[in-house]
Amino acid sequence: MTNMKLLKTLLSAALSGAIMSASSLVSAYGMFWYDMSTDLPMWKKAVIFPLSNAWEPDRFLISTDETSLLYWENKYLMERFEKKIKNMHTIRLAPGIQEKGEILIDRYSMLLEPYPSEKARAAAVFEQTGADMYIIPQFTQKYVHKDVSPSIEANVELSSWTEIKNGPDGDKTTDKKTWTVHHVMPAHNVYLGVTELSYTGYDTEANKVMLFSDIRHGGGDDKHVFRDISKYLRKEFSEIKSGDREKKNKAGTVKIGFKNISLPSNGNVDVYSIGGTRYPSSEAAFASFNRYKDGSLNISKAIDELTIKSIYYATKIKAVEELNGVRVITDGSSDEPADYYIKGDVYTWQRYWYWTAPIIGKTTETIKSEEEKWKDKDGKEHTKTTTQYREKVTESGGWWSVGHRISAEFSLINAKTGAIVFSSSSIETNDKIMDAYRHGLDKFYKGVKAYLKERGIK
């Protein structure tokens, strides 16, 4: 063991204490993984770096203008960790952040310099701060997708009429007129914001111990999007620190392990298709898309490191959360014998951009409405309402919406016999791809729970 690792171990042991009180189990709502073989739940000090861009990793995004969006984003991120995560002291490297009157970015400015390797940065972080880990947040995507809603034209039949309600002659419609207009809706630009925010956590020897990424398409202004993504990392991190999952897992008696989860074979390349036709790039696919019609542009997503780790993590954590009386073997390298194994096959891992075509329609508007009193032959008073209506042309421009779909099959296998004792398959859609995957797991674990309950495991 290196001196640095020994010192870190001793520091963690010295700082360890009571774990924070119980909190509700939550979903990360994005890609999330942490190394469950580490002592991360017991770590007490983390360095939070300012934001950066994945395409400019050596330049941290810092602004001293307190009215700027960037200043607010860094401040919001820092505060979420400092105020919401108990039993974790954070050293926050952003302008304006003070500790005991000292501006931390001045004290630790050397940590924001470029380093020849992540290992060199990790060594500097530990040397300067004694922290157990550090977190680097990055925008991995941040752009506005621009497109054109094409010009369309149509002949629209319009009408006008008068409705009389509760008159001396009852209800009736009069003065019906109909005519046709030729309407042209001009082309116009349409926009869809895309923001993907990722966080990578490292230990003091530059090993990745935590990964998080979530994406939003549209969804409001920049502050709303940033706040929405950031809060889920904080919730998941808080749940790890609580230790609730570990306590529940240790209490289980029946042991469940995991076999391989097979994934789509498109490797590290996104596959773009419209119908059955594939295209070499997103640009080519969008260029070939007929925007006069509704339709979907499908992207079969590459299965990268974060995706693989998030899939396995979600599968294991869902088992811990959903199954009572079960101890989940979370360590994939463990030789511990299991009573059951879970096997998964993911067939589709896809994002789809759905285009809703522009349309010319019509709506009815009220031109005038009047009331008039009248009496019947018995002298009883009534109120007649006369309303004039007229139709007018409406325009609805084309627009993109983005969603995700997965198809998967999961099986529970008896470890002694090798027999599949329960399985379920599903096709799920959601605006967040990991939530679509979790929905499939929910269905599977509901069946597993029923199977185990029949055998007295509660």
Image (spheres, rainbow, N blue to C red):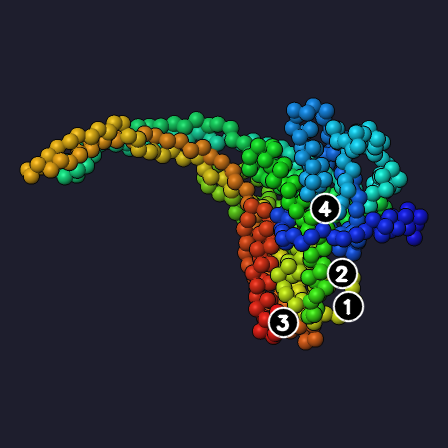
Q: Earlier in the sequence, mark 2 or mark 4?
A: 4
- For residue 399, say whether it is visible: yes
- For residue 133, say whether it is visible: no
Label at residue 331: 2
Residue displayed at 75% across by 61% down: 332
Amino acid type, label 4 = Lys
Mark 2 surroundings within 10 Å by alpha-carbon count, few (fewer than 14), some (14 through 19), many (20 or more)? some
Q: Residue furthest bottom?
A: 417
Mark 3 surroundings within 10 Å by alpha-carbon count, few (fewer than 14), some (14 through 19), many (20 or more)? some
Q: CA distance from mark 2 to mark 1?
A: 9 Å
Comparing marks 2 and 4, which lies closer to the viewer?
4
Q: Earlier in the sequence, mark 2 or mark 1?
A: 2
Relative image position of residue 132 (x, y in whole percent): 82, 46
- Check disc 1 and report the residue beneath it: 336
Relative image position of residue 10 (x, y in whole percent): 88, 50
- Check disc 3 and report the residue beneath it: 457
Q: Earlier in the sequence, mark 1 or mark 4?
A: 4
Asked whether the beta carbons under mark 1 and mark 3 sit within 8 Å of each other, the answer is no
The picture quadrant where one finds residue 128 is top right
Q: CA distance from mark 1 to mark 4?
A: 33 Å
- Check disc 4 and report the residue beneath it: 86
Asked whether the beta carbons under mark 1 and mark 4 sit within 8 Å of each other, the answer is no
Q: CA distance from mark 2 to mark 4?
A: 26 Å
Asked whether the beta carbons under mark 2 and mark 1 sit within 8 Å of each other, the answer is yes
Kind of element beneath mark 3: loop
Amino acid type, label 3 = Ile
